[in-house]
Image: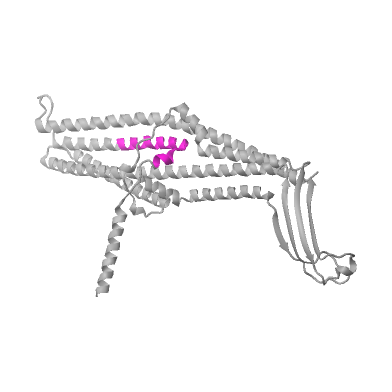
Amino acid sequence: MKRLRCRWIALSAVALLSSLSATAQVSLYTVVDMALRNSTTVRIAQADVLRAAAGLTESKDAYIPNVNFGSSLGYSYGFPLGEPSVFNVSSQSLLYTFSQPDYIRSARAAVQSAEFSLKDAREQVVLDASLDYIQLNKAQTTLATLDQEKEYADKLISIEEDRVLAGVESRMELTRAKLTSARIDLQRIHLQNDTEMLRQQLAHLTGLPAASFVTNTNSIPSAPRILPENEGKLQTTMQNAGVQAAQANAKSKLYMSFGDARQIFRPQFYAGGNYSLFAKFNNYNEFYQHFQYNNFDIGVQIKVTLFDAAIKARERRSAADFARASAQADQARDTTDEQIFQLHNSLTELAAQQRVAQLQAELAQDQLDAIATQLTDGSGSANVPPRSPKDELQARIEERLRYEDVLDANYAVLRAELSLLRSTGDIEDWAKSGGK
């Protein structure tokens, strides 16, 4: 019984801790950090960096002598053919070619391109995780606002029903109040579906359970400082990781084409050596004078290619690869410049919309305060009709609607600002500036 009781206590404790962890708040820093660790895109980019680094090492290691061990044991009758050695050790290395330095430069530029691609992938993951987190935070605030609107709408329906029964209000006003409540219900269902989808997206990004995402507004850093348009374009061209990766890739293709173009009519120098122990049972000593069991040679090989159709075809292919990569780099730069220009223009418009939403919210609050004052103290004028609780509830619903508009406008502005920050390569620093 004691063991069974202890097991039940342990299971209860685990269930309690699980429920607490499921409802605990998760900061933006934690979400971004987990997304960077869990992202398949980032892992693929990291593998590309390792692959490029291995390619650079391979191009350099061509100068390091290789060592091979082998054996050619066999029986022969009559005049011995070939070289049936007991074992042999050979070594060969590249001394110099006109192409190898270009191949090394190409591999080094490929490493830089992979590193920039990794940075670009990390920045995109940070942007996606941050926007999903901020949108989820906004959705949670909006849901609380809708709950208040629903409460006001239900009270308004109750008042309209009483007024209809008393014969002082038409059923049209009751239907209008019910329509307001139904629209709130529809909006809430739509927002709840969006919230669940955002939790699923964050779960896929971070690997955390979807139910564990309860946002913390205080963990979201303040809006970043947006540079002027001209300065922002310059920083985009110089710092955008995608553009830098495309330019480094074009540079790698350029050096590769240089190397392939220097294969023909240029000497290639190789060093090599070989040691072989010949077998005694193949009767070499009967057919060769001064037969030697231990044999060793060392020397330098010089090779000049005068014609090779495969090399010429590879040279043309490398030139085409460079032309393509160069055009892609120019395309990436132009596309980024256009995006930054469009974001700056849209940010100006979104800021104006944000200002309008804020003023409308302030106006709705002022109207609500005025109605509440008139309900308490009276209108103070015989020409102004008296206010009713119905007017107050309608004003409260309007004020909540305008507050939702402010939340949407603030999110739209922040999304544009983060997109601009992603273009300049500083979004990861921004996302982690809020702390854990």
The answer to which of 28 and 193 lies nearer the viewer is 28
Left or right: where does residue 391 sit relative to residue 200?
A: left
Residue 316 drawn in magenta: no
Camera-nearest residue between 249 and 399: 249
Residue range (magenta): 405-431
Q: Is residue 213 left or right of residue 227?
A: left
Color scheme of the displayed model: one colour
Question: How many dots with numbers?
Answer: 0
Residue 141 in picture, x, y percent from top left = 29, 43
> Residue 16 or 72: which is nearer the viewer?
72
- Give the quarter of the image for residue 255: top right
Relative to 263, 341 lies left or right: left
Magenta span: predominant SS is helix
Mark yes or no: residue 108 visible. Answer: yes
Residue 423 inside the magenta-drawn segment: yes
Asked if residue 388 is positioned above or below residue 30 in the image, the reply reads: above
Q: Residue at x 53, y 44 (%)?
A: 115
- Quarter of the rendering occupied by the N terminus: bottom left
* Residue nearest the observer in this picture, 132 or 254: 254
Quarter occupied by residue 290: bottom right
Q: Position of residue 233 (x, y in %)?
A: 48, 30
Q: Is residue 178 visible?
A: no
Tell me where residue 162 appears, x and y as whole percent.
13, 42
Q: Position of residue 345 (x, y in %)?
A: 43, 29
